[in-house]
């Protein structure tokens, strides 16, 4: 009889009120603040959000959850080494490489202008490679390293719990 009454009037069910309390509590005090901090409150492209969340997640996992000391890594020594490499990349390596990338762009003389006329395509390609070769190399290095580490994190997500 009681179950039938609860089905007809969910307000009598104690779980209904616990759910309401938890929902309001999560709204007032979010449980995963590190995600909001990583993503921010402004719009970002989805690919950037994925990168930010995965790398912020690994930083949170190691620093806040103390995963390297809490979990027994005896059977997962190779995974632990890769995880430390990813953590170091996420914590400092990525920002350092991004700074190098930002500094690698050629300076432009405003008086001279941006467009330079070339007589043939080969000269234009040589000039482009001279100006942007290092920039392209660093962009590729960052993209490839991010992809390698994010792939590893997704593939090994089952060992990333505390």
Image (spheres, helix red, strand yellow):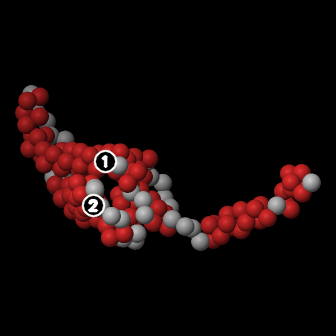
Q: Is residue 102 visible?
A: no
Task: Kindly identify the residue that appears in the image at 42 percent across and 59 percent down.
Answer: 161
| Picture quarter with the C terminus | bottom left
In the image, residue 154 sits, relative to residue 27, either above or below, namely: above
Tell me if 73 is positioned left or right of 34 in this view.
left
Task: Kindly identify the residue that appears in the image at 16 percent across and 54 percent down.
Answer: 104
Q: Which of marks 1 and 2 is nearer the N terminus?
A: 2
Q: What separation in Å lies between label 1 and label 2 (alpha carbons)? A: 19 Å
The residue closer to the viewer here, 10 or 29, is 10
Task: Kindly identify the residue that appears in the image at 62 percent across and 67 percent down.
Answer: 26
Q: Residue 40 at what x, y percent from top left?
A: 46, 62
When asked about the image quadrant of residue 86, the answer is bottom left
Q: How crowded is mark 1: few (under 14 residues within 10 Å), some or many (20 or more)?
A: some
When asked about the image quadrant of residue 116, the answer is top left
Disc 1 and disc 2 in contact, CB within 8 angstroms: no
Q: What element carries label 1?
A: helix
Residue 74 disc label = 2
Task: Kindly identify the residue that appears in the image at 67 percent across and 66 percent down.
Answer: 22
Q: Residue 32 at what x, y percent from top left?
A: 51, 65
Q: Can residue 29 be seen in this view?
A: yes
Tell me if 120 is positioned left or right of 77 in this view.
left
In the image, residue 133 sits, relative to residue 104, either above or below, namely: above
User: Which residue in the rendered view is the most extreme toward the front?
Assistant: 75
Residue, disc 1: 152
């Amino acid at each position: 009889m009681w179950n039938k009454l609860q089905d007809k009037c969910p307000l009598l069910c104690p779980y209904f009120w616990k759910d309401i309390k938890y929902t309001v509590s999560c709204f007032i005090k979010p449980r995963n603040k590190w995600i909001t901090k990583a993503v921010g409150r402004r719009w970002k492209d989805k690919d950037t959000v994925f990168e930010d969340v995965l790398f912020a997640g690994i930083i949170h996992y190691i620093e806040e959850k103390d995963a390297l000391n809490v979990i027994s890594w005896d059977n997962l020594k190779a995974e632990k080494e890769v995880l430390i490499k990813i953590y170091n990349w996420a914590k400092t390596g990525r920002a350092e490489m991004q700074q190098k990338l930002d500094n690698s762009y050629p300076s432009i003389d405003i008086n001279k202008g941006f467009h330079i006329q070339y007589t043939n395509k080969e000269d234009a390609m040589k000039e482009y490679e001279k100006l942007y070769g290092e920039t392209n190399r660093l962009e590729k290095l960052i993209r490839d390293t991010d992809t390698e580490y994010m792939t590893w994190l997704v593939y090994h997500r089952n060992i990333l719990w505390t």
